[in-house]
Image (cartoon, rainbow, N blue to C red):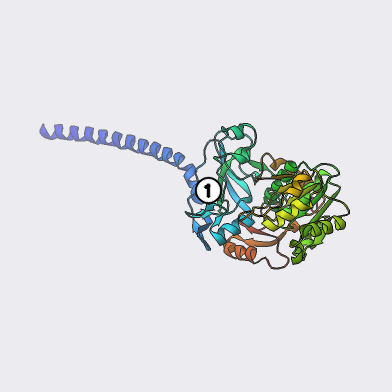
Amino acid sequence: MLTRFSAKNFRNCLKLFSNFQRNFSANDKKKGNKKSKNNKSDKGKGDKPENLAVVLHAKQDLKMETKPIAKIEPKEVLLAMDCVGICGTDILFWQGGKLGPVVVKDPLVLGHEASGVVCEIGKDVKDLKVGDRVAIEPGTFCRNCRVCRQGRYNLCPFMKFPSYPPTDGLLQRYFKQNSDMCHKLPDHLTMEAGALCEPLAVGVAGARRAKVKLNSNVLIVGSGPAGLATSIVCQAIGASKVMVIDKKEDRLEMAKGFGNMTMPLVDSDGKDLNKTAKKIHDCMGCIPDKVFDCHGSQETFKLAIRSTGWGGTCCLIGMASGNFTDFPLMDDVMREVLITANFRYCNDFPAAMAIAANSKYDLLKMITHHIEFDDALCAFDTALKQEPGTMKVMVHFVPQGTNNPKKKNNGQC
């Protein structure tokens, strides 16, 4: 009796255990599937390379370090950098640890002239998709202050500008930005040209500030990337004459290649402003009504103002350093010279991109050095030395041409 009862209960126990085991396995499988779904995006992030970056720690202390990949907000996109140009301000921060009153106090990623490829989008992004090639307009502004509401967001007092302390820049493999600040490149435009849209936007903003128009006579002091970009923009607008002056004759040769008149300066030209201004007017064959100082020193700004014609406009574009003193402005006031300045850009990237897409010149000739990202520290040395023939140094995160339009057999894109 006891044996039959035990056997019967044993069979029931086995049956219950078997059902429990099947239920447990099914539940475990469901949890496993749920976990696998939840980790789908994590797997994608794991596939990304390390976010290596060029980080400035202090004056002349530049290192390559790994940074965490930023998490995007609903209206942001994550960008995989393609190429980044080295700007003069990057060199100034690196060499001096500061730019004017702004001092590097904490580690700072440099770089702000860039193009990249969208690799992740926020849930509210409608205008871009993964894989889009974009020129990146740097900067995040509040959108609520008086100047932002007036449409002059470049002057926003709460602006967070990449590579400008304390905001990290774009010389890192991955960077997040608001989607409306990422401008989709035309199909035929290269990633390198996309990165050049940033200095071109500076030129567009300066020309707009000085009100360059058809038949303007333009003088540009300084033939660096900003000077060349400004000259290209002024020609595109329809300026009658554009002349570039500089002490560096190798840069003037490049300026000639972009359709500019040129005149070399010598050391003695800074001693008598009136004499040098007349020399410029004679060489140009007219008195310029729009003058840009794209160098940014006290000497060049004085010369730019004095070279401006009666009732003309002189615009400071170059990042000036030091205090400006001993300015004999009375002569310039009596000529009603309008002295103004331009700071970065505001709603100027679309125009810059249109100029890049339709320019009669090969803008890529502005890039004299192409350097892989692994050698980014060497790229900074190259940009610093400025040996003859050096203009724009471009750092490539992927092999050059990887994301550029593919040419067909007939050579067309």
Tell me, yes or no, if residue 222 can be seen here.
Answer: yes
Q: Residues within 10 Å of mark 1 (few under 14, many from 20)?
A: some
Question: Mark 1 belongs to which amino acid?
Answer: Thr
Residue at left 33%, top 36%? 22
Whether residue 50 is visible to the viewer of this picture, yes or no, is no
Residue 301, quarter of picture: bottom right
The quarter of the displayed image where residue 385 is located: bottom right
Most distant residue in the right direction: 285
Q: Nearer the viewer, residue 294 or 160?
A: 294
Q: Which residue is mark 1?
A: 167
The answer to whether 32 appears left or right of 343 in the picture is left
x, y percentage for residue 105? 48, 54
Write the residue at 64% across / 35% down.
127
Assign a secondary structure to mark 1.
Answer: loop
Q: Is residue 122 left or right of residue 150?
A: left
| Residue that protrudes farthest toward the left in the picture | 2
Q: Nearer the viewer, residue 49 or 254?
A: 254
Q: Nearer the viewer, residue 306 or 222?
A: 306
Closer to us: 382 or 310? 310
Residue 396 against residue 381 in the figure, above or below:
above
The N terminus lies in quadrant? top left
| Percent position of residue 244, x then y | 79, 56
